[in-house]
Amino acid sequence: MSSFNPSRLRKYFIMGSQNVEGNPVTVLEQAVQAGITIFQFREKGPGSLSGDSKLKLGEELRTVCRVNQIPFIVNDDVALVDKLDADGIHVGQDDQSVKELREMFPEKIIGLSVSNQNELNNSPLEYVNYIGAGPVFPTTTKVDAKSTVDLDWIRFLRKKFPKFPVVGIGGIDTTNAKRVLEAGADGVSFISAVTKAENIKEAVNKL
């Protein structure tokens, strides 16, 4: 399993074409220049691309990440990992098992969303590089978002796993990111905090 530097989680940008009105490649370029530390390609939900168009956009976004040495993660689309030569994959509890993913991708970064104690009990973390903990706050970006876990879930995970990389997920913006970090997360993930920002550089700085 590849070693993973938790500092990479600090400013974790997630985006697909459905999240932006303009060109997602331009948005990613601006976010990279502003200081994001890792990127997840999440082409999912109403208005998202599929097939060749999804692949083409993924290739363009991956190129931006590669040129700037930013890890490029795909969201739960196993086939895309090889097609895009991604650095890793992030999955939820209902996606392919992380044990199977680790067998397929021994050297890739694997992230797993964990929202409660029951999910944690059923999550073999020995196959995972980091936990996505959330949704911390209410989110409008995911139509199937689970109920919020608040900052107590971050605190609990940090106490239980002092050294395991944890990134906060869900409803995180420039007004509350600091609280997530203070609760013990290694980083914060965000979508609309950047895709809907009037000034991307300013937004990333505040995150």
Image (tube, grey):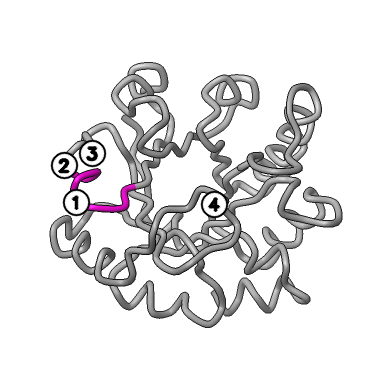
Residue receiving disc 4: 38
Disc with the residue nearer the chain's start (4 vs 2): 4
Residue 99 appears in which quarter of the rendering?
Answer: top left
Stretch of the chain drawn in magenta: 114-120
Disc with the residue nearer the chain's start (3 vs 1): 1
Does residue 66 sit above or below 51 in this rendering? below
Answer whether labels 3 and 1 touch (C-beta < 8 Å).
Answer: no
Residue 103: % across, % down? 33, 17
CA–CA distance between discs 3 and 1? 13 Å
Residue displayed at 57% across by 79% down: 206
Answer whether labels 4 and 3 touch (C-beta < 8 Å).
Answer: no
Q: State the residue in front, 131 or 165.
A: 131
Residue displayed at 31% across by 29% down: 1
Residue 127: % across, % down? 27, 32
Tag 1, which secondary structure? helix
Residue receiving disc 1: 117
Question: Which labelled disc corresponds to residue 125?
Answer: 3
Question: Which labelled disc corresponds to residue 121?
Answer: 2
Tag 3, which secondary structure? helix
Disc with the residue nearer the chain's start (4 vs 3): 4
Disc with the residue nearer the chain's start (4 vs 1): 4
Q: Which mark lies nearer to you, 4 or 2?
A: 2
Mark 1 neighbour density, 10 Å: few (under 14) some (14–19) many (20 or more): few
Residue displayed at 58% across by 62% down: 140
